[in-house]
């Protein structure tokens, strides 16, 4: 960008000071992009060209127009709508103050605002106003409407005194300046042979990356499905249960029986002992 601005400053310093010898033209700086689009054309402003007047008017006309006056002075100029966008004759496109005559080059700055101010000082774009298409057709106003695509245009700078509304000087008509042609999509060659080597390589790499990405996605999807099936199978498998049966507490007899022992004779109680003694006493008495 800095190189382009420096070259443009060199080109502007060589501008002629005679209006009749000057023609509006697109700056011959190939490094500046967007000087011509399908609907706009960027022209170099007339720096140090007009010695009188305070307003510069820009006139445009299509090269196919039937009426192209050599001079605009004291002539009635129709509007953009009346001339159908310059198809039948010249129209007043726009106006701007006469630029200051200076040979100072572009300021090399990183500030976008400064760069924009420098471009506004040295350049003018024709065709960047869409709103004027809605104005009244018979009102004499400037209309910097978008240019027709695929149609060359001629332009003229005219210096005017705003206080007296008189035209004081003007330049010659420019050479035909074509806008960028818009290719019809129906005639675009889509055959692979019309592609460059770089386009083929980039397309191949993108296709391979897309294929690898698709394979990774499919692999991840299959893995997720298999993992889900294994989880469901584990959840549905019955869990073995253990039961503790009720066991009867073994009594003393059961223990002896289990151990193969006989139970001991029961010991007489105290009451039975006394009964035995009484029985023995009675037997002795009856025996005598």
Image: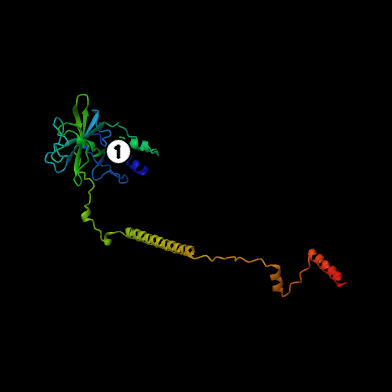
Image location (x, y in percent) of residue 222: 42, 63
Image location (x, y in percent) of residue 264: 76, 71
Which quadrant of the figure has residue 19?
top left
Q: Residues within 10 Å of mark 1 (few under 14, many from 20)?
A: many
Image quadrant containing the C terminus? bottom right
Image quadrant containing the N terminus? top left
**Can residue 130 be seen in the rendering of this structure?**
yes
Residue at (37% x, 38% y) in the render: 112
As displayed, is residue 256 above or below residue 149?
below
Considering depth in this image, is 24 or 80 the residue closer to the camera? 80
Residue at (41% x, 61% y) in the render: 221
Considering depth in this image, is 139 or 34 the residue closer to the camera? 139
Image mark count = 1
Considering depth in this image, is 48 or 126 the residue closer to the camera? 126
- Secondary structure at badge 1 equals helix
Which quadrant of the figure has residue 110?
top left
Which quadrant of the figure has residue 189?
bottom left
Query: Where does label 1 land, which residue?
Result: 12
Question: Which of the colour schemes (rainbow, by chain, secondary structure, one colour) is used?
Answer: rainbow
Q: Identify the residue at the far bottom of this view.
A: 260
As displayed, is residue 130 above or below residue 192?
above
Horizontal side of 32 relative to 280 (left or right) equals left
Q: Identify the residue at the far left of this view.
A: 66
Residue at (19% x, 41% y) in the render: 154
Image location (x, y in percent) of residue 22: 22, 37
Image location (x, y in percent) of residue 117: 34, 35
């Amino acid at each position: 960008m800095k190189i382009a601005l420096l070259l443009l400053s060199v080109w502007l310093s060589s501008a002629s000071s005679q209006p009749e010898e000057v023609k509006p033209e697109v700056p011959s700086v190939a490094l500046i992009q967007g000087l011509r689009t399908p609907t706009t054309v960027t022209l170099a402003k007339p720096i140090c060209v007009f010695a009188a007047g305070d307003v510069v008017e820009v006139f445009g006309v299509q090269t196919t127009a039937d009426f192209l006056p050599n001079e605009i002075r004291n002539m009635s100029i129709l509007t953009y709508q009346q001339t159908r966008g310059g198809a039948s004759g010249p129209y007043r496109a726009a106006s701007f103050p006469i630029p200051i005559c200076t040979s100072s080059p572009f300021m090399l700055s990183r500030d976008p605002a400064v760069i924009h101010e420098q471009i506004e000082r040295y350049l003018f774009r024709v065709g960047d106003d869409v709103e004027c298409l809605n104005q009244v057709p018979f009102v004499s106003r400037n209309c910097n409407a978008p240019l027709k695509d695929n149609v060359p245009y001629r332009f003229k700078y005219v210096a005017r005194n705003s206080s007296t509304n008189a035209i004081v000087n003007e330049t010659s008509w420019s050479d035909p300046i074509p806008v960028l042609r818009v290719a019809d999509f129906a005639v675009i060659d889509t055959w692979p042979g019309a592609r460059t080597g770089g386009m083929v390589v980039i397309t191949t790499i993108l296709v391979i990356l897309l294929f690898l990405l698709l394979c990774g996605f499919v692999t991840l999807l299959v893995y997720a499905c298999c993992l889900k099936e294994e989880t469901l199978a584990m959840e549905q498998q019955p869990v073995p249960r253990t039961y503790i049966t009720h066991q009867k507490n073994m009594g003393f007899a059961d223990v002896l029986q289990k151990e193969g022992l006989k139970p001991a004779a029961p010991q007489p109680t105290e009451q039975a002992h006394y009964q035995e003694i009484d029985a023995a006493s009675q037997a002795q008495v009856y025996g005598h």
